[in-house]
Amino acid sequence: MKTFRQIIYAGLIGLILSADLPSFAQNTAANPPAAYLRYPTIPPFELKALDGKTIKRDNLANRQGTLIIFFSPDCHHCIDQMEQMVAQAGKFQQYNLVFATYQPMNELQLFYTKYNLSTWKNLYIGRDEKFFFPPYFKIVNLPFNALYDKKGNLITTFEGTTAMDKLLNGFAKK
C-alpha cells in the first residue's frame, strides 16, 4: 500500500511540475511599465506636511524643475545623499525639492531639524501616508530620485545614493 501511495504522490508531483502553470517570478515582458513611464509627468501626489497641511503637485512653485526624493530618515544611503545636498544646497535653489517618506512624522521632524531644512525655501517635505510613491515608481532602492523639467515632464530617475553632479547634470538633459 505504501508503494502505491508513493507512486501516486510521485505522479501528482510530476504532473504539477510539468503543467504549464503561471510563474510566480516576474516576467518583465508581460508586466506593464511603472506608472511613471506610462504617465511621464509629475504625479498627483499628496503628502502630509509637518504642520499637518497637505502638499500636492499643484502646490509646487514654478521653478526650473522638480526633484522628487523618496527616502527614509534612518537609511544610511539617504543620509549620505542628504549630507551631500546640504553641502551643495545653493545649487538646488532653482528647483522644487519634494522629499517624501513613509516613516512616522516624529522621525521626519528629527530629520528636518537635524539638517536645518526650515531655511530651504524650495523644499516640500512630508509623509506619504497613502504609500503612493513606491508602487507608482516601482521603487526598489532608497533614496529614489525622479527629475522633472520645468513643464513637469520626466527627465530621468536614479535609485540609491546619487552624486550631486549626476543629479544636477540630469536636469541639463532636457
Image (tube, grey):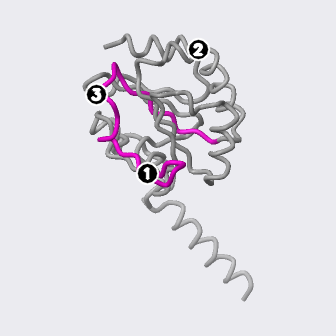
- Report the amino acid beneath label 3: Asn
Residue 13 magenta: no
Mark nearest the camera among 3 and 2 is: 2
Percent x, y of residue 126: 51, 46
Percent x, y of residue 87: 64, 16
- Report the amino acid beneath label 1: Phe
Q: Secondary structure at mark 1?
A: loop
In this image, 93 relative to 117: left or right? left
33 to 80, vertically: above or below = below
Q: Secondary structure at mark 3?
A: loop
Q: Earlier in the sequence, mark 3 or mark 2?
A: 2
Q: CA distance from mark 1 to mark 3?
A: 19 Å
Q: CA distance from mark 3 to mark 2?
A: 24 Å
- Report the amino acid beneath label 2: Gln
- Near mark 2 (Cα within 10 A), the count class, few <14, some 14-19 or many ≥20, is few
Percent x, y of residue 67: 44, 28
Residue 69 magenta: yes
Q: Which residue is mark 3?
A: 153
**What residue lies at 52% left-to-right and 67% top-to-bottom?**
16
In this image, 129 relative to 72: left or right? left
Percent x, y of residue 101: 56, 45
Q: Nearer the viewer, residue 160 or 149?
A: 149
Q: Earlier in the sequence, mark 1 or mark 3?
A: 1
Q: Which residue is mark 2?
A: 88
- Near mark 3 (Cα within 10 A), the count class, few <14, some 14-19 or many ≥20, is some
Q: Which residue is mark 1?
A: 132
The residue range painted magenta reads 48-72
Q: Earlier in the sequence, mark 1 or mark 2?
A: 2
**What residue lies at 38% left-to-right and 10% top-to-bottom?**
172
